[in-house]
C-alpha cells in the first residue's frame, strides 16, 4: 500500500508529461514549440528539485550547470567545417571534434555532474543564506567567463548553426528519464538521508548522517540532470547566448519550482508545465488568442507583467505551492488492505 | 593611487546605503528583497521623466522620493504582508516576481533604450582637479556624505529612540517582541519607508553619475550588494552595511587595478573573493565569533 502510493507519485508526473506530449503532437507545427519548451523546462526544474527540494537549501547555481551543458552540447554538434568559420578563436581540440546528438547530451550531463561535484565539494559545507549566495557567486562566475572567454564559445556573440535535434519525442524521453531518475533518488537510501537533514539537520547529524556528503551527492545528480536539460535546450533553440542561461531563466525555473511546490516531484513537474504554459499563452496573447469564443488580447510587452503578477498572486494565495509540497497519492476511496496485513 | 582610493570610497558609500536599506528590511522581516534594485530603477525613471518635462530640480527630487516610498509601501501591503509567515524561499521568489514585473513595466513604458535624466548637472563637476593626482567630483562628496549621514542617523535612531528599540527588538526576535507589545505593523512600515528613502537617495546619486536610465538600471549593483550584505553578515545592521561597503570597495579596486584585458572578468574576481570569504567565515565576515548561523528554524 505504501509502495503503491509511492508508485502513484511516479506515475502521475509521467502521465502529465505524456499528456503534454500528446497535446503537442496534436497542435499545429507552429505551436509545437511551446510544448517543446514546456518539456525542456520540466527537465531543468526536476534537476533543480533534486537538490533544492530534497535538501531544503536554496541554490541559484543550478543554472550554471544548465549553461555548461548547453554550451558543451552546442559546441560539440556544430559540424567542424562550420565551426572553424563561425568560432575562429576556439581551442584546437574543441574545433576539431564533433559528435552526434545523443553523445553530446550524455556529455552535457557528465560535464554538469563533474562541475557540480567540483563546486559542491567546498560549497556544500555552507547552509542557509550563505549557501544561496555562494551558489549565486558560482553562477556569476560561470556567466562572466562564458560571456567573455572566446576560446570555449562565442563570447559576447551568439553560437549558431547548432542542429535542432530536440523534437517532441526526444524532449518527452528527456523529461521521462529525468523524472524517473529523480524518483529513484528520492526513494533511495541517499535520498531519504538527505530529506532527514532537510527536516532537522542537527538531529540527522546526531544519528550519524553526514550532511555534507548527502548534499554533495544530490548536488552532483542535480548537476547531471541540469546539464542534460541544457543540452536539450540548446538543441531545441539552435542558437544560444550566455544571457539566455543566466538570471531570467534562473528566476523563471526557481519560480516554477516554488509555484508548483518545492518539496515534491509532482510540484516540480506541475509548476514547470503550468508556468511554462502560462508564459507561452501570454506571449501568444500579445497577438490575440481565441479561448472559448473570447478573444484574449494583451498589449505588446505585457506578457511578462502579467506573468510576474500571476506568480506573485499564486504565492500569496498558496505559499507552499500549488501541490503544497505533497506527492500524488491514491485517492481516499481506493480499496486498501488493512494495516499490518501480509 | 589616490584616485583609486577615492573611487573605491565613493562606490563603497553608495553600496553601503543600499546595504542599509536591504538590511533594515531583512532585520524586521527576515526577507531578502530582491526587488530593491527595481525601486532604485523606478526612482531613476521618475527623475528622468520629470526632468524631461522641465520640472525644477527640487520638484523632481521630491517626486522621486514620493514615488519610491509609495512603491515600497505598496510592495509591503500587497505582497510582503500576506507572505509574512511563508517559507523564506517563497518570500524570495515573490520578490523575484515583483522585480520581474517592475522591470517589464519599465521596458513596456520606456523601451530598452531608456531615457536620459538631467538633474543637478552641476554636481558632476569636479570640486578640485589637480590633474596629476586625482579628480574629485561633487557627486562623490555627496555620496560619501549621504553614506555617513545615513549610518550615523540610523545608529542614533536605533540606539536612542523607542522606535529604534522596537526595531532592534523585532530584529532580534520578532515573535517575542510582539508578545512584549511591539507594534509589528508600525515597526515594519517604518523599516520599509526608511529603506525606500535610502533607495530614492541612491537613485539620485546613481542618476547623477550615469544619466542614462534603462530598465536594467542598478540591477548589477543590487546583485553585488545583496551578495555583499550576506558576506558581511545579515544578522546585524552594521555588519551588513560594512559588507556592502567592502564589496563596493573591492569591486572598484578590481575595476581600476586589473590589467585592461582582464577588466571584463571583474565580476569573476569579486565572486571568487566572495566564495573564499564565505568558506572561511560562513556567518559573515564581520560577525562576532559568538554569532549564531544565519539559518533559523
Image (cartoon, coloured by chain):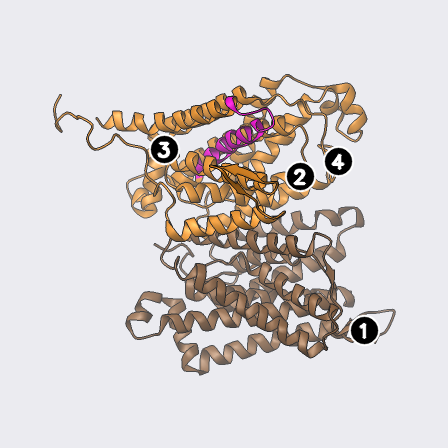
Chain colours: A orange, B brown
Q: Residues within 10 Å of mark 2 (few under 14, many from 20)?
A: many
- Pointer 3 and pointer 2: residues touching (CB < 8 Å)? no
Frontmost of labels 4 and 1 is 1
Q: CA distance from mark 2 to mark 1?
A: 38 Å
C-alpha span from label 4 to label 2 = 12 Å
| Magenta segment | A26-51
Task: Please provide percent x and percent y for residue A165.
Answer: 62, 21
Q: Nearer the viewer, mark 4 or mark 2?
A: 2
Q: Which residue is mark 2?
A: A242
**Residue drawn at x 41%, y 67% as measured from the top left:** B171
Structural crowding at the residue carrying mark 4, measured as other residues with C-alpha within 10 Å and reported as few (<14), some (14–19) or many (≥20): some
* The quarter of the displayed image where residue B250 is located: bottom right
Chain under numbered label 1 = B
Q: Residues within 10 Å of mark 1 (few under 14, many from 20)?
A: few
Query: Closer to the N terminus: mark 3 or mark 4?
Result: 4
Disc 4, disc 2: CB below 8 Å?
Answer: no
Which one is nearer the viewer's eye here, B143 or A170?
Answer: A170
Secondary element type, mark 4: loop
State left or right for residue B144 relative to residue B159. Answer: right
- Could you confirm whether marks 4 and 2 are on the same chain? yes
Say which of marks 3 and 2 sits in front: 2
Which residue corresponds to mark 1?
Answer: B125
Circle on res. A150: 4
Label 4 lies in what chain? A
Corner quadrant of residue A234: top right
Amino acid at each position: 500500500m505504501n509502495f503503491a502510493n509511492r508508485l502513484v507519485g511516479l506515475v502521475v508526473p509521467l502521465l502529465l508529461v505524456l499528456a503534454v506530449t500528446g497535446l503537442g503532437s496534436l497542435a499545429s507545427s507552429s505551436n509545437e514549440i511551446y510544448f517543446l519548451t514546456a518539456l525542456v523546462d520540466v527537465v531543468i526544474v526536476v534537476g533543480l528539485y533534486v537538490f533544492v527540494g530534497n535538501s531544503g537549501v536554496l541554490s541559484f547555481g543550478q543554472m550554471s550547470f544548465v549553461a555548461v551543458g548547453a554550451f558543451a552540447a552546442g559546441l560539440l554538434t556544430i559540424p567542424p567545417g562550420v565551426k572553424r568559420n563561425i568560432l575562429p578563436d576556439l581551442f584546437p581540440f574543441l574545433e576539431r571534434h564533433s559528435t552526434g546528438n545523443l553523445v553530446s547530451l550524455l556529455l552535457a550531463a557528465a560535464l554538469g555532474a563533474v562541475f557540480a561535484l567540483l563546486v559542491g565539494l567546498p560549497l556544500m559545507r555552507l547552509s542557509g543564506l550563505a549557501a544561496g549566495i555562494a551558489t549565486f557567486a558560482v553562477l556569476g562566475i560561470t556567466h562572466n567567463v562564458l560571456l567573455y572567454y572566446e576560446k570555449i564559445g562565442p563570447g559576447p556573440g551568439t553560437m549558431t548553426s547548432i542542429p535542432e535535434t530536440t523534437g517532441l519525442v526526444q524532449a518527452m524521453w528527456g523529461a521521462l528519464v529525468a523524472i524517473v531518475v529523480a524518483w529513484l533518488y528520492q526513494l533511495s537510501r541517499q535520498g531519504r538521508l538527505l530529506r532527514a537533514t532537510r527536516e532537522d539537520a542537527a538531529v540527522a547529524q546526531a544519528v550519524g548522517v553526514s550532511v555534507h556528503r548527502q548534499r554533495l551527492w544530490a548536488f552532483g545528480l542535480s548537476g547531471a540532470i541540469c546539464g542534460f536539460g541544457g543540452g536539450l535546450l540548446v538543441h531545441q533553440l539552435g542558437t544560444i547566448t550566455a544571457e539566455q542561461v543566466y538570471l531570467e531563466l534562473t528566476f523563471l525555473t526557481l519560480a516554477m519550482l516554488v509555484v508548483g511546490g518545492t518539496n515534491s516531484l509532482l510540484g516540480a513537474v506541475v509548476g514547470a508545465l503550468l508556468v511554462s504554459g502560462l508564459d507561452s499563452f501570454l506571449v501568444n496573447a500579445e497577438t490575440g488568442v481565441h479561448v472559448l469564443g473570447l478573444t484574449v488580447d494583451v498589449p505588446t510587452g505585457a506578457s511578462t507583467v502579467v506573468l510576474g503578477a500571476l506568480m506573485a498572486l499564486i504565492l500569496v494565495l498558496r505559499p507552499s505551492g500549488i501541490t503544497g509540497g505533497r506527492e500524488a497519492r491514491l485517492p481516499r476511496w481506493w480499496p486498501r488492505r488493512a494495516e499490518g496485513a501480509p | 593611487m589616490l584616485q583609486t582610493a577615492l573611487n573605491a570610497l565613493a562606490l563603497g558609500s553608495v553600496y553601503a546605503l543600499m546595504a542599509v536599506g536591504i538590511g533594515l528590511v531583512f532585520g524586521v522581516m527576515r526577507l531578502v528583497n530582491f526587488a530593491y534594485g527595481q525601486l532604485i530603477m523606478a526612482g531613476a525613471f521618475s527623475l528622468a521623466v520629470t526632468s524631461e518635462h522641465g520640472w525644477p530640480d527640487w520638484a523632481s527630487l521630491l517626486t522621486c522620493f514620493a514615488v519610491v516610498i509609495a512603491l515600497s509601501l505598496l510592495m509591503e501591503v500587497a505582497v510582503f504582508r500576506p507572505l509574512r509567515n511563508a517559507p523564506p524561499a517563497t518570500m524570495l521568489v515573490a520578490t523575484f516576481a515583483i522585480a520581474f514585473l517592475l522591470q517589464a513595466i519599465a521596458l513596456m513604458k520606456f523601451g530598452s533604450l531608456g531615457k536620459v535624466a538631467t538633474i543637478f548637472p552641476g554636481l558632476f563637476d569636479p570640486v578640485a582637479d589637480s590633474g596629476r593626482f586625482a579628480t574629485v567630483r561633487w557627486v562623490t562628496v555627496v555620496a560619501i556624505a549621504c553614506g555617513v549621514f545615513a549610518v550615523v542617523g540610523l545608529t542614533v535612531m536605533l540606539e536612542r529612540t523607542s522606535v529604534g528599540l522596537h526595531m532592534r527588538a523585532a530584529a532580534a526576535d520578532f515573535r517575542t517582541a510582539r508578545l512584549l507589545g511591539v507594534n509589528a505593523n508600525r515597526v515594519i512600515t517604518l523599516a520599509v519607508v526608511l529603506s525606500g528613502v535610502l533607495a530614492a537617495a541612491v537613485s539620485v546619486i546613481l542618476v547623477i553619475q550615469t544619466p542614462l536610465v534603462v530598465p536594467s538600471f542598478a540591477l548589477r549593483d543590487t546583485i553585488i550588494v545583496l551578495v555583499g550584505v550576506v558576506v558581511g553578515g545579515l544578522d546585524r545592521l552594521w555588519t551588513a552595511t560594512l559588507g556592502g561597503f567592502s564589496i563596493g570597495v573591492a569591486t572598484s579596486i578590481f575595476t581600476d587595478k586589473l590589467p585592461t584585458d582582464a577588466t571584463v572578468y571583474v565580476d569573476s574576481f569579486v565572486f571568487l573573493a566572495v566564495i573564499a570569504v564565505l568558506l572561511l567565515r560562513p556567518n559573515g565576515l564581520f560577525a562576532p565569533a559568538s554569532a549564531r548561523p544565519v539559518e533559523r528554524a
